[in-house]
Amino acid sequence: MNIATEMNSEEILRARLEVLRHEHRDLDEAIRALQERSTSDQFTMMRLKRQKLALKDRIALLEDQLTPDIIA
């Protein structure tokens, strides 16, 4: 794998990471808005929280891929 391809892959991962973080923030705002409503739908709330958790897991995976392994 050459340097140009490696940099390109890293840029793609960073862009994807930013998109996922944005989606995570959007879900957080949607959950907050539902909680503020007096008649919030619990099924929808659970579904959004599950999606948010799945996004968090995907974000962590991408962050791990971007962090270089350090041999101590």
Image (spheres, rainbow, N blue to C red):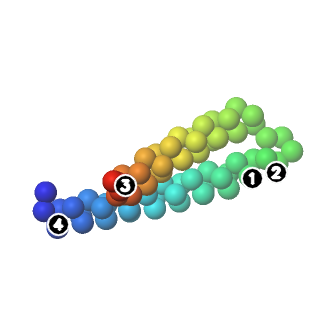
Q: Return the residue nearer the eye: 35 or 16.
A: 16
Cα separation between marks 2 and 1 = 5 Å
Whichever of callouts 3 and 2 sits on the residue coming sooner in the sequence is: 2
At x 24% / y 66%, what residue is drawn? 7
Cα separation between marks 1 and 3 = 46 Å
Q: Return the residue nearer the eye: 29 or 9.
A: 9
Label 2: element kind? helix
Q: Are marks 4 and 1 in contact (CB under 8 Å)?
A: no
| Mark 3 surroundings: few (<14), some (14-19) or many (≥20) residues within 10 A | few
Q: Is residue 57 left or right of residue 40?
A: left
Mark linked to residue 36: 2
At x 70% / y 48%, what residue is drawn? 31
| Mark 4 surroundings: few (<14), some (14-19) or many (≥20) residues within 10 A | few
Cα separation between marks 2 and 4 = 50 Å
Cα separation between marks 4 and 1 = 45 Å
Q: Are marks 3 and 2 in contact (CB under 8 Å)?
A: no
Name the residue beneath numbered marker 3: 72
Name the residue beneath numbered marker 4: 3
Q: Amino acid at mark 1?
A: Ala
Q: Position of residue 63 (x, y in %)?
A: 43, 54
| Mark 1 surroundings: few (<14), some (14-19) or many (≥20) residues within 10 A | few
Q: Amino acid at mark 4?
A: Ile
Cα separation between marks 4 and 3 = 25 Å
Can residue 16 be spotted in the picture?
Answer: no
Name the residue beneath numbered marker 1: 33
Whichever of callouts 4 and 3 sits on the residue coming sooner in the sequence is: 4
